[in-house]
Amino acid sequence: MEPLTDMTPRATLVLLFSFVALSCLFRFSSCADPTYVYNSCPNTTTATSGYLSNLNILLSYLSSNATSNSNNTFRNATVGQSLNTVYGLYYCRGDVTRDVCRDCVIFAAKAITQQCPNGTIAVMWYDECTLRYSNESIFSIVTSAPTIMMMNTQSITDSTRFNQLMINTTNKVATKAVNDSNRFATQEVTYTQLQNLYTMAQCSPDLSGKDCNSCLSRANSLLPNCCSSKEGGRVINPSCVVRFEIYPFYGLSASAPAPSPTLVSLPPPSNGSTISEKQGSSSRKIVTIVVPTAAAGVILFSILLYFFLIRKKNEDPSKKNGGNSIESADSLQFNFSTILAATNNFADDNKIGEGGFGAVYEGKLPNGQEIAVKRLSKNSGQGAEEFKNEVVVVAKLQHRNLVRLLGFCLEGEEKILIYEFVPNKSLDYFLFDPMKCVQLDWQTRYKIIGGIARGCLYLHEDSRLRIIHRDLKASNVLLDEDMNAKIADFGMARIFGVDQTQANTDRVVGTLGYMSPEYALHGFFSVKSDVFSFGVLILEIVSGKKNSNFYQRDCGGDLISYAWRHWNAGTTFELIDPIMRGNCSKTEVMRCIHIGLLCVEEDVADRPTMGNIILMLSSNSVTLPLPSGPASFMRGRMESGMLVEGKETQETESYHSKSSSIPISVNEVSITMSPK
């Protein structure tokens, strides 16, 4: 639209408050405040007086259009010129009435200047509307930062079935929203005879279908991480929102308001744009939602949380489960006597694994909890303080596709790690055994591939720190009782700073056949190093063949080269494990091989990120770029004798361990992604 002419700030404020007053008078009652959700005020650049003047004009214009008789659910505008230009828009939830939309926009226009007084960028979310502005154009552009995840504190009892239903339904409602001209959709399904599941998805209406699809797919991929087994949850960002509840929260009349459960905001993913806890708290203090039920819920939750923290403080370390409230290594320390009793003095009968770092034992704590105890060798070379600091970091990693570290024991020269116990041992235990491999049908393998990808995405982007595993392989992927993948063994993991993308080392450690060329040859590693290892894993899972075995046969190179030759020859289906060729989804298998070859590209820049990999796995409608060719460094290394054929270095290890986890399904959202 055409830029608006400038007005004085005083005239703007008078006009804005006039609309607020008129809105209240016409309704013959005081205006009901919209339901506040969150706000973001980065304030990276202080606004000039000219910018603030134009901002007032912009907010006045948006408010006035919200009161018009025409379709007022979306509006954008540009005010000013040059450095003082302000771009702004609002969009209301697709089911709200014109009056509700009007009241929300007017209220938001006033509140956003109070909560974000001097910045050039701001976003404010309410249940009923979203209002945002920026000093750069935001029209028809997907903006995923910041991303906020919120969950209902109440849990569902039948979590496995509910989580599957939630994932399937939110995927379907996202597809409906993409195909809707207003980019809004709702979906209701039956959960029990007395209870339904209600879902909603919405994009900013100015987004294209492709961009809306991309935004909602990203949001849906985060829902299981934040809100599994919960009665409600949502993921919001400036461009889209996806939400589910067990009560109807849309399409309600004023006389039938929705319940107000207690919601807890979770830390957003570490994608370079986060909202601090302090900022979120202050925002809630400024704009309050006066709903008695919600207030009572918050008070009750606070009391319970207080007593829970007191109990945790005084709890015996052997009963702790490595939760997110870890502050120091001392809170994770087990007594050596407890570990001796749990493992029968490290009896051989309890030994379940052996690796370069030491042996692993099965154990049981006094409270009956089964654990895996890794007893590090005395020549591990790690000091006590360094060891304890690493323990604290790893224990904070909480994801269903990662093996959870419960604690440690440090006694003299003894350094011991205590993990959850995973019952079905490791992936290689099944995958490369001619008898046990039949237990891995294609659906199970496909679920394992998706689980590994989600675990890696958490390490790379969604955890509090950026973690590079550096030794991702089949023996370091454990399987729980439902055959869900859990990434294990962080002995070689490296922690990156928030803005750090790569590092190098003179001490290259890892496993032959899984290391990326830039790491093996030059010591450079990054998230793309793990992507390379993941690509090798995909090819192994699909073929049932171990990469290193090709060095010992007359197969003309490694598994990567073997797969590439079949790809070029158009005989890719021959790569598939013979035991499942007659009972698998050819489309899914071929897609996984395609993704695997993209992951092992020699050029680091050509490999996809783990986030893109999950999108590729999630839907057959994703457009995949063609692979240009795999890395061919390994053969040269073999010929020069720099690495031992088919063997792990002394720095690697695996262990087989027991625990349960919620089954994970692969997201089936339809996504379109441009090729590189």
Image (cartoon, rainbow, N blue to C red):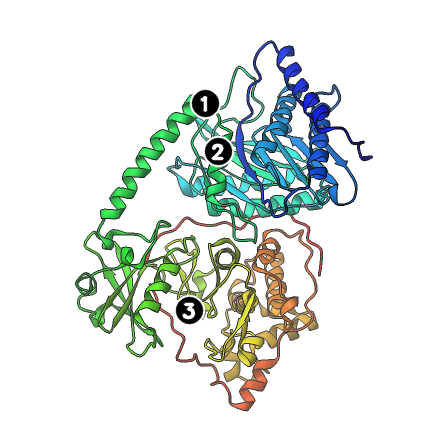
* Location of the C terminus (image quadrant): bottom right
Query: Measuring 58% from the left and 34% from the top, which residue is drawn there?
Result: 125
- Give the x, y percent position of residue 449: 51, 59
Q: Please, is residue 400 above or below residue 289 in the view?
A: below
Kindly report the distance in space between the C-alpha atoms of the residues bearing marks 2 and 1. 14 Å
Classify 10 Å Cα crowding around label 3: few (below 14), some (14-19), many (20 and above).
many
Q: Amino acid at mark 2?
A: Arg
Q: Which residue is mark 2?
A: 284
Q: Amino acid at mark 3?
A: Ser
Farthest top residue in view: 28
Q: Amino acid at mark 1?
A: Val
Q: Which residue is mark 3?
A: 475
Kindly report the distance in space between the C-alpha atoms of the residues bearing marks 2 and 3. 47 Å
Q: Which residue is mark 1?
A: 291
- Give the x, y percent position of residue 577: 53, 67
Mark 2: which secondary structure? helix
Q: Quadrant of residue 334?
A: bottom left
Query: Measuring 69% from the left and 70% from the top, which residue is drawn there?
Result: 628
Between discs 2 and 3, the one toward the N terminus: 2
Classify 10 Å Cα crowding around label 2: few (below 14), some (14-19), many (20 and above).
some
Residue 539 is at least partly visible in this image: no
Q: Please, is residue 495 above or below residue 649 in the view?
A: above
Q: Nearer the viewer, mark 2 or mark 3?
A: 2
Q: Quadrant of residue 573?
A: bottom right
